[in-house]
Amino acid sequence: MITEDNQRTAEFQKEIGELNRQKIVRQLHNGLTQTVSALAMRINYARRLIAADPVAAGEELEKVEDLARAATKEIRHIIYLMRPENQENTDLISELKLLASKMGELFDQDIEVEVQDAVADQLPQDVQDVVYGIVEELLESSRMLGEKNHLILSLSLAENDLAQLNLEYR
């Protein structure tokens, strides 16, 4: 029985690792790769403008600078997600608040986290890990879709000790 439980736990952890890897690959493709491609196109355009219209070239270079800053933020976010120590040895409430804080500072989002205290005490650790992953996906999707910058994330226990997660856009 214990061997089976250990095997299931190992398989679950392997599956979570693969899902995290896929998420990072998706973020690299959907975010950073697109930004770097846009940088290359804008630099090429600015280079061609320099002789003909230096003012327009300068404006284009300002856009390049903004894109480079956005790429830097995206890289920092991906590096943060790749660090497994970010999600270990802390409680769910602290993890969610840290995630909201990091995304807020990197992507200029105001994310409020409201978690019922009993949630962290009553949910098993593997369920807390899944909840964290779902929240991470929700916040990332909101950011990628350009949803409003003020978000309220709430997590509470519903009837039958089920976790209830809400994300409200304002």
Image (tube, rainbow, N blue to C red):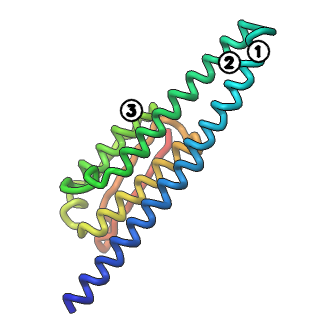
Picture coordinates of residue 141, whole percent (x, y):
53, 50
Q: Which mark is residue 49?
A: 1
Q: Secondary structure at mark 1?
A: helix
Q: Which secondary structure, mark 2? A: helix
**Numbered disc in front, either 2 or 3:** 2
Near mark 1 (Cα within 10 A), the count class, few <14, some 14-19 or many ≥20, is some
Label whose residue precedes the other's in the sequence (3 or 1): 1
Report, in whole angstroms, how far the alpha carbon at label 1 lies from the one at label 2.
9 Å
Q: Is residue 165 left or right of residue 30?
A: left
What is the number of the mark on residue 105? Answer: 3
Please report the residue visible at 36 percent of the width from the left and 65 percent of the height from the top: 130
* Alpha carbon distance from label 3 to label 1: 34 Å
- Residue type beneath disc 2: Glu
In the displayed structure, would residue 137 be above or below residue 142? below
Q: What's the residue at 66%, 11% (across, down)?
A: 58
Residue 8: image quadrant is bottom left
Q: Is residue 138 left or right of residue 96?
A: right
Q: How dense is the environment of label 2, judged by Cα within 10 Å: few (below 14), some, or many (20 and up)?
A: some
Mark 2 or mark 3: whose residue is earlier in sequence:
2
42 in relation to 137, above or below? above
Q: Position of residue 104 (x, y in %)?
A: 40, 35
Name the residue beneath numbered marker 2: 60
Q: Are marks 1 and 2 in contact (CB under 8 Å)?
A: yes
* Marks 3, 1: nearer the viewer: 1
Q: Earlier in the sequence, mark 1 or mark 2?
A: 1
Q: Is residue 46 above or below residue 31?
A: above
Tag 3 secondary structure: helix
Using residue 77 as the reference point, say whether residue 70 is left or right of it.
Answer: right
The amino acid type, in three-letter code, at marker 3 is Glu
